[in-house]
Amino acid sequence: MRLLVTGGSGFLGRHVLAEAHRRGHECLALARSPGAAQVVSALGAVPVPGDLDDDAALPAVLAGAHCEVLVNLASLGFGHAPAIVAAARAAGLDRSVFISTTAVTTTLAAPSKRVRLAAEERIRSSGLKWTILRPTMIYGAPGDRNLSRLLVLLRRAPVLPVPGGGGRLQQPVHVADLAGAVLNAVERPETAGRSYDVAGPEALTFAALLRESAAAAGRRIHLVPVPLAPVITLTRWYERRARQRHFPARIRAEQWQRLAEDKAFSIDDAVRDLDFAPRSFAEGVRAEAAALNLGPRLRPHEEE
């Protein structure tokens, strides 16, 4: 198939483009900068100059690509969905796969939740032959925004404070498994009009996730439960300082607040319709630690 991919230079996008190339698909990827164009070119995709912020130009960009399927990996949290949907319809590009997130199920009144839910509703009412995938926390390779930093930290810190105690459930999904699900949705038109939660095979507590990650990094970790409220207060102060000094905050209070919620989801529909067979977290995090050269250090007599 001939696919038009948005977000192709991002973390998930790089894996989707690589897997699409392996399966023999022809990919064109929207690129807003020379750097993005270079990334997608290296993955076998043809870069298409374009910017999701340029509503007026987007229909011509999509029409000029002459693709069969739109694969929208770009975040729905920035309000681009109406422009993307309108451009896809104007271009006659009715088959589409969109990536959303299970974060829309949060009980928090997060601004991004409202934007993403509105985006999903716009997609559903668009008249396109859409499929929506909602992944959980994505991990599995150097460069992810979640486990990579945690693994480095765990390698250095034998003691780790855990806001909220770590008893709530998590269900991370490996990026390669998610990329496979995206392309299975592309290849199966019968999934049109359906939404799928895409997560790991089992939920585990945050504390268990930390211990499994520490083991992957070759460390034993001592977890110290700490109250969540003061951590949230301190992080809000940090976020204000970051805004005042015009630098991006590396952590947000909302991320701590979400530790008070279970993030566990049924993947039965994805297993049935997308042949989704995700690897265990233990397998995935060990592979990521090895890729980061953070795996268990061998004793001298164990070295080859």
Image (tube, rainbow, N blue to C red):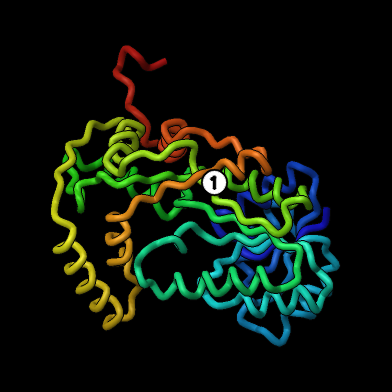
What is the three-letter code of the residue carrying label 1? Answer: Val
x, y (%) of residue 286? Answer: 42, 33
From the viewer's perspective, is 22 left or right of 179? right
Please say whether residue 141 is visible from this viewpoint.
Answer: no
196, above or below 234, in the image = above
Residue 132: image quadrant is bottom right
Q: Is residue 277 above or below residue 163?
A: above
Left of 203 or right of it: where is 232?
A: left
Q: Which residue is mark 1?
A: 175
Residue at the (28%, 35%) spot, across then down: 211
State whether residue 283 is above or below residue 298.
below
Residue at the bottom extreme of this rendering: 56
Dot 1 crowding, Cα within 10 Å, few <14, some 14–19, many 20+: many
Front residue of 139/188: it is 188
Q: Quadrant location of residue 194?
A: bottom right
Q: Residue at x 80, y 54 (%)?
A: 26
